[in-house]
Image (spheres, rainbow, N blue to C red):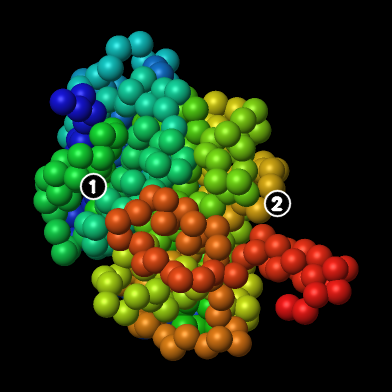
């Protein structure tokens, strides 16, 4: 009988009602806003959660563009005791951190008042002790298929020895977190899984994904808020933390756990390489084990990271593809395979199967090998895979025949 837990961790956000006039001011000029900017921008969230952690009541949220009066002129009470003059605010990239410190005992309610608005917000606990010294895989996900999520967890458990998953769900509408919890319980993954409902607008994209040419990344607050929340509520004392999306599997030089490579380093940073939407077996379903082709035409994708949080400063910002102002170690042969087929086209169309082209497509040997080991009953068995090893063996055989004067 497993003593592992699969648990939904609820949060206490503070959001301005849609009927109220107060709104966040968009930082992006109208000329650079795509048509769906208004729908995707978070105008109303003041904070994502309120929780007690190490003598602080923390309530972080998106930048306060146009809403600073809610902090500067607002009134704050912890269990009816006035702390209005004791609010601390730190501004980071696409994020602001608010906290009240020197609180020795966890209060129950934060009352936040501004003009005609008043919010009574439940103060939650942190889970730092539960995840202390744990090897954690964490992500932000939306509407990914249950079998993909289960396969993803199993891969990291077998190959990287994770013992905990921290899974933030961003407004999935194909299923509820309770349904996901019940599914994962039936998989008997024998690992601690914490599911967090993160039901906030993700935010408009920037760069080439905005549809407006070269635009800034300035309006996507959701994931940055998730990183900060995860750090202070769950991960601050974890032994190691992997930041990976559901379609990303880490491949190490010799098949070792990435935490072995992390060792005494603050963190590791590594590129990704696309795994093309070319099934190994057309009769098999869309799962990790059915894909391993790469293209000679592809460059590496954005970097991802694995860190030891206890070796980083408390106020160091975790970002999507880097850790702010921290130099992370690169190791030759360490990368992640980025599966185009394990996706629902939320950014770009990438899932449709493409035709194999012998001149540009080739098997990623390490990815295929790790998938075959992880999913031995499901992975297609390829009759022949050309590797560096058997190329060398063929060459040695040729030399021996040549020295002996034999034909081959």
Q: Is residue 148 above or below residue 262?
A: below
Depth-wise, is mark 2 or mark 1 nearer the camera?
A: 2
* The N terminus - image quarter: top left
Picture quarter with the C terminus? bottom right
Residue 24: image location, x then y, percent? 37, 59
> Which residue occupies 21% across, 36% down?
6
Q: Would you say 309 lies left or right of 163 here?
A: right
Name the side, left or right, on which 396 lies relative to 358: right
Q: Is residue 114 visible?
A: no
Find disc 2 in the rendering and name its residue: 332
Q: Which mark is residue 245?
A: none
Q: Nearer the viewer, residue 128 or 137?
A: 137
Q: Nearer the viewer, residue 157 or 8?
A: 157
- In the displayed structure, 142 sits above or below 46; it is below
Q: Residue at x 81, y 65 (%)?
A: 400
Judging from the image, what secondary structure is the residue with disc 1 in? strand
| SS at circle 2 | loop
Residue 319 in the image: x percent, y percent?
Answer: 53, 50
Q: Quadrant of residue 118?
A: top left
Tag shown at residue 197: 1
x, y percent for residue 124: 24, 28
Against 230, is 331 above or below?
A: below
Give the CA separation, mark 2 to mark 1.
Answer: 37 Å
The answer to whether 180 appears left or right of 31 in the picture is left
Residue at 55% across / 86% down in the picture? 358
As drawn, which residue projects farthest toward the top?
Answer: 104
Occupied quadrant, residue 317: top right
Identify the residue shown where x is 85% and y is 68%: 404
Q: Nearer the viewer, residue 283 or 61?
A: 283
């Amino acid at each position: 009988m497993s003593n592992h837990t699969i648990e939904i961790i609820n949060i206490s956000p503070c959001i301005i009602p849609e009927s109220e006039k107060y709104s966040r001011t968009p930082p992006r000029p109208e000329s650079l806003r795509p048509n769906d900017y208004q729908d995707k921008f978070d105008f109303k969230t003041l904070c994502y959660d309120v929780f007690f952690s190490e003598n602080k009541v923390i309530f972080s949220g998106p930048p306060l563009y146009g809403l600073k009066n809610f902090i500067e002129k607002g009134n704050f009470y912890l269990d009816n005791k006035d702390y209005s003059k004791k609010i601390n605010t730190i501004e980071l990239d696409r994020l602001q951190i608010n906290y009240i410190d020197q609180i020795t005992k966890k209060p129950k309610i934060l009352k936040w008042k501004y003009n005609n608005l008043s919010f009574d917000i439940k103060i939650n606990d942190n889970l730092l002790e539960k995840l202390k010294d744990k090897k954690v895989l964490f992500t932000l996900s939306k509407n990914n298929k249950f079998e993909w999520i289960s396969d993803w967890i199993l891969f990291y458990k077998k190959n990287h020895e994770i013992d905990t998953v921290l899974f933030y769900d961003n407004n999935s509408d194909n299923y509820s977190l309770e349904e996901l919890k019940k599914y994962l319980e039936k998989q008997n993954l024998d690992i601690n899984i914490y599911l967090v409902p993160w039901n906030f607008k993700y935010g408009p994209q920037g760069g080439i994904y905005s549809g407006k040419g070269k635009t800034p990344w300035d309006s996507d607050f959701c994931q940055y808020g998730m990183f900060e929340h995860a750090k202070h509520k769950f991960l601050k004392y974890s032994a190691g933390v992997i930041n990976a999306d559901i379609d990303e599997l880490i491949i190490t030089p010799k098949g070792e756990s990435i935490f072995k490579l992390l060792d005494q380093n603050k963190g590791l940073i590594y590129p990704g390489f696309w795994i093309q939407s070319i099934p190994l077996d057309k009769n098999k379903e869309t799962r990790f084990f059915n894909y391993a082709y790469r293209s000679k035409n592809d460059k590496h994708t954005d970097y991802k990271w694995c860190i030891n949080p206890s070796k980083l400063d408390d106020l160091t910002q975790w970002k999507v593809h880097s850790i702010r102002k921290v130099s992370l170690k690169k190791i030759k042969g360490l990368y992640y395979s980025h599966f185009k087929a394990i996706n629902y086209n939320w950014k770009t169309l990438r899932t449709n199967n493409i035709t194999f082209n012998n001149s540009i497509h080739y098997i990623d040997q390490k990815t295929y090998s790790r998938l075959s080991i992880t999913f031995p009953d499901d992975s297609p068995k390829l009759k022949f895979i050309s590797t560096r090893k058997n190329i060398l063996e063929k060459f040695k055989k040729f030399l021996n025949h040549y020295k002996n004067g034999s034909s081959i």
